[in-house]
Amino acid sequence: MIPSSRLWLLPFLFTHSFAVILTQTTQIKPNSVYDYIIVGAGTAGLVVASRLTENSSISVLVLEAGVSNQGGIATEAPFLAPTLTPNTQYDWNYTVVPQAGLNSRTFSYPRGHVLGGTSSANYLIHQYGTDEDWNRLSSVTGDAGWAWNNMKQYVQKHEKFVPPVDGHNTTGQFIPTLHGFNGVVSVSLPASAQPIDSRVIATTQELAEFPFNQDTSGGDHSLLGIGYLQSSAGGGVRSSSATSYLALANGRPNLTVLINAFVTKLVQTPATTSGTKAFRSVQFTSSPGTGLTPAVTVNARRDVILSAGTVGTPHILQLSGIGNQADLKAVNITTIINNPSIGSNLTDHVLLPNIFNVQGTQSFDGILRAPAQVQANVNQWSTKKTGLFANNVANHYGFARLPSNATIFRNNTDPAPGSRSPHWEMLIGNFWFNPGVDRPPTGSFLSIVTALVSPTSRGTIKLRSSNPFDKPLVDPRHLTTEFDIFTMRETVKAIQRFVAAPAWAGYVTSPFGTAFSAAKTDPLIDTYVRGLASSLFHPVGTASMASKSSTTGVVNPDLTVKGTEGLRVVDASIFPFVPSCHPQGPVYLLAERASDIIKAAQK
């Protein structure tokens, strides 16, 4: 159910999609053959589709279960990102199983069900992770090509850094040498100033614990400290894989994109290499709600490429008989390849929305409660692509580490990939922000979301049944390790120190809610955290990459699925560790290198 505080957006959320691509499964002839079939037109899938079809002799079919990204303001105006999920047509509308570490609570688990995937439905935050993230991936896989020294070239190929739409002077807000200016996806700094900006910057000057960071994109520049948010937007409009990479390729006759196409399984085909199983055929039908159609099978000359995401990719593999034999037997699916790693190692960031009461009317809560003011902002964005709705939900965020002498390290190793990579994040919003919970009818608020970005808890994606339309069992197992709850506890203490800085005097009055107000001892902080935390919805790891010689893992360093031929995975599920940042940027870089790997295999 959509919270009542968002009902005013219904006309914008559910406008008709003006599809510019195929929309009916009957438009694809059964047993059609393409060089490549990509399952999922998401963040990674459309990059690969665009890059592969640069060669006019290569044919590509992309199958997307979701809807068009066009025709609605919410998919374009950055500030409206929170309205896109959950419980909308743009969301797969998954729900996690009861979480033992979160008082057995369950909650929505948004993933993009739309052309562009989660890049069309997320909060647009754009970073690349730390060099230590990438170097760890290289070390684990034994492939130097995944190290940062090689991967950083793809920043230039991918990114098109553009001036903010309000035209303000950005000197000191980013480091130009860290960015690309001639790439594909637009990236920009905040599109308008917020009343709390000066307080945030003042705090970085008043408290040494929270230093200023001139650039938050990462790489070999430290992520640590507080800086200006960078978003995948340009000209006040979201820039997704659909509006960028697909736009480059949309007129190519060798590219076919079909939305409303629900893949039910991969089909085994004859193998050419002894000891392997081939999967060069895909079976799909119409997505639920788009009209029942017969199943269609299509075939790939070269590869089927799964880009269905961290939830969708293991779901499809398991439905196809590729997975943990015991789990498949439990739902009456015959095992073709027994690989217990598939669907395991689910790793995700944990979110905690810490909300403070504030004085005055500087927060955006009053605007968002007033239909006339909302409409005025809609009109401004629609006509000029400026104003509040042209901006992201925050202008500043930051990353930090636990102290090196923290007691948790007496019996736990540091899970971060290196000493310059963060353990946790904070994002500072000038209004009520608590996903899925209505804004109170009165009051003004400051929200400081804290997130665990180096979790040690690991979860699973498993089949609910053999019916492909039954949503999988999503179990991230949040906060089930000592390190994770310790770190979240320390984030609460840290933001309490943050708002105690002189910069917030006379503005922040008190924590919001009984549990937050009482969170002054470790046990009471833990009670507060376990009762409120959920996911930041950055899942990775369920088809994790490992070295070619490893007996664990799902894909090899060239992204081929172990024990198969003609089958690759290119999406966030291949990361064995969640990046120390918002993962959209790393997925784009992954997809760029994957495209080069696949092209090289054609020779």
Image (tube, grey):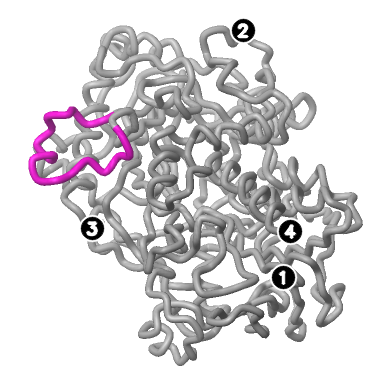
Residue closer to the observer: 73 or 468: 468
Q: Which residue is mark 4?
A: 602
Residue 373 point in image, percent of width and height: 62, 28
Secondary structure found at label 4: loop
- Tell me how far mark 1 sits from mark 4, CA to CA: 27 Å
Q: Secondary structure at mark 3?
A: helix
Depicted 453 relative to depicted 312: above or below: above
Label 1: few (<14), some (14–19) or many (≥20) C-alpha neighbours in 10 Å: many
Would residue 390 be visible to someone looking at this image?
A: yes
Q: Nearer the viewer, mark 2 or mark 4?
A: 4
Which amino acid type corresponds to the residue marked 1 in the rendered image?
Ala
**Dot 2 or dot 4, earlier in sequence:** 2
Residue 406 lies in the magenta stretch: yes
SS for dot 1: strand
- Check whether the beta carbons of the residues at disc 4 and disc 3 lie within 8 A of each other: no
Residue pointed to by mark 1? 261
State which region is magenta: 401-418
Tell me: 530 left or right of 377.
left
Q: Disc 2 marks which residue?
A: 169
Give, as a three-letter code, the residue at label 3. Answer: Gly
What is the distance, in whole Å, between disc 1 and disc 3 at their CAs?
Answer: 36 Å
Of mark 1 and mark 2, the one earlier in the sequence is 2
Q: Amino acid at mark 2?
A: Asn
Instruction: Please tell me which of labels 1 and 3 falls first in the chain.
Output: 3
